[in-house]
Amino acid sequence: MKEFDTIAAVATSIGEGGISIIRVSGNDALKITKKIFVGKNDRKLDNIKSYTMRYGFIVDCDGNKIDEVIISFMKGPRSFTAEDTIEINCHGGVVVTNNILNEVIRAGARLAEPGEFTKRAFLNGRIDLSQAEAVIDIIRAKTEISARSALQQSEGIISKEINELRAHLLGIIASIEATVDYPEDELEEVTADIATRKSSNILMEINRLLQSADEGKILREGITTTLVGKPNVGKSSLLNTILKETRAIVTDVPGTTRDIIEEYINFKGIPIKLIDTAGIRETEDVVERIGVEKSRQMIEMADLVLFVLDNSRPIDEEDKEIFEYIKPKNYLVIINKIDLDKEMDISELDIEKSRIIKTSIKGEVGIDKIKQRIEEMFFGGKIDYSDVYVTNNRHKQALIRAKESMRHAIDALSVTLAIDLASIDLRDAWRHLGEITGDTLEEDIIDKIFAEFCLGK
Ligand SMILES: Nc1nc2c(c(=O)[nH]1)N(C=O)[C@@H](CNc1ccc(C(=O)N[C@@H](CCC(=O)O)C(=O)O)cc1)CN2
Ligand SMILES: Nc1nc2c(ncn2[C@@H]2O[C@H](COP(=O)(O)OP(=O)(O)OP(=O)(O)O)[C@@H](O)[C@H]2O)c(=O)[nH]1
Ligand SMILES: [Mg+2]
């Protein structure tokens, strides 16, 4: 374990609650807490055992009581940070919590930076970088599935696969370098053959991980589903109906929605990030025009576009224009207001039949069909929990770089004389994979990753 100063922060969210926790981590955690804690019957913290608790009061320098608390102690390396850790459990009020934190700082701790506790767990070697990132993913998880997947990653399932690939790479590199040191043409050929076969296997594994990234992104962020269409077709009504709450304002005035509205919902455990946008039309109104421009941007970012049409109005140029815009995307067409007389001929747009769903939001018709189609379109309606998904974009980018290096290596191996060049590419791949676990990442990049964590984590 490395030597660091002792840090402290509020580990719970700031606000009124039952209990708040102030966490203190480092060599002096116990020494610092002793200065401000008075146990019942004056019992001292001297002989506190790891993973036990004590009852008492936190006091200021004049001996005035600040709050009634329970303290727990975790002796390093058996703690979250792998350092000596004290947790002060006080009453969950903003003022008492901050007062206690101030006393801890006054007694000699330093205020922790965002993510610094988790960073210590990493620097002390208890977890690797991908596991540390998964800890924050657990906190930010929007659905049960993303929470479950993040927990798996915090236990190191990605790390395990990456470490295995890296070990294989080192094996190949070693055999190539041995050959290069004792050059005999025949030996080089044999080595190149074996190395090519092994490298292809590694490339296949990298590809498999990369293929999981699309679904992984969905696990993490949900299926970004954007509602688009002309004004007044019923986009906001659809959002409200799916959410089962009146989230967006609905009126019969075209141009009601001006700003983007985002909400998360679950379709059988699949997270959906539902986005309502301003109806798209040519407009002189400046505010509305900004809204329309934003709608166009939201289409770019969407995993799925729900193009809403009004059954009681004929298809016009604007509909055709919007359709051209969404055609390259993954889309469904919602023909809404089928309770009204039909004035629309959908054959004017070139849409596959399976993508069309007819609804009456007013009559609550067809909503379940939308949910069902979305479920079918993603994960084939179900998610395999035992699979490893790459959910982190940083990991994905590192895998892409590793894949490139593996391709170069395999190319070089096909030219027998260049087998020593291949070993350079294989080393690059080894390094890129190591960026995922943090083994081969620059310190400033690591700092940046932890800086994005929340305070107290
Ligand atoms: N009160 C409290 N609850 C919490 C945390 C915490 O820090 N404090 N955690 C913080 O996020 C999470 C738990 N994470 C933890 C991870 C590792 C260890 C730990 O001590 N690991 C040791 C083995 C412990 C043992 O031997 O019993 C190790 O891995 O070496 C503790 C907590 C969630 N709940
Ligand atoms: N008859 C009928 N009316 C509907 C239906 N769905 C929505 N409406 C009505 O259509 C009007 C417009 O609905 P909104 O949900 O505000 O439409 P929007 O697409 O969000 O409109 P903008 O925000 O202006 O782009 C409201 O008066 C709704 O009550 C439907 O299925 N049938
Ligand atoms: Mg609207």
Image (cartoon, helix red, strand yellow):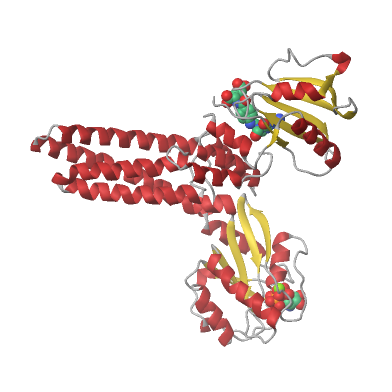
The residue positioned farthest toward the right in the image shown: 64
* Residue 109 to residue 259: above or below: above
Closer-to-camera residue (180/267)? 180
Residue 331 in the image, given as x and y percentages of width and height? 53, 68
Residue 184 point in image, percent of width and height? 9, 35
**Can you say which quadrant of the picture contains the C terminus?**
top right
Taking depth in this image into account, of 449 and 260 the one nearest to the observer is 449
Q: Is residue 319 above or below residue 456?
A: below
In the displayed structure, 279 sits above or below 23; it is: below
Asked whether residue 334 is in view, the answer is no
At 61% from the left and 22% from the top, the residue drawn is 76
In the picture as drawn, the residue positioned furthest to the left comes out as: 185
**Residue 168 in which image quadrant:** top left
Tell how many labels. Answer: 0
Residue 381: x percent and y percent?
54, 53
Q: Residue at x 84, y 43 (%)?
A: 16
Q: Is residue 175 left or right of residue 443?
A: left
Of the pair 343 and 32, the residue shown nearer to us? 32
Residue 423 shown left or right of residue 266 in the figure: left
Q: Quadrant of residue 160?
A: top left
**Residue at the farthest top position:** 47
Evaluate whether residue 104 shows in this view: yes
Please tell me which residue is depicted at 21% across the width and 35% down the height of the picture: 177
**Residue 361 percent coordinates (x, y):** 71, 70
Q: Quadrant of residue 8?
A: top right
Q: Quadrant of the N terminus?
A: top right
Classify the position of ligand 2 by quadrant: top left, top right, bottom left or bottom right.
Answer: bottom right
Residue at 81% over, 37% down? 97
338 or 198, which lies in front?
Answer: 198
Say left or right for 355 vs 364. Answer: left
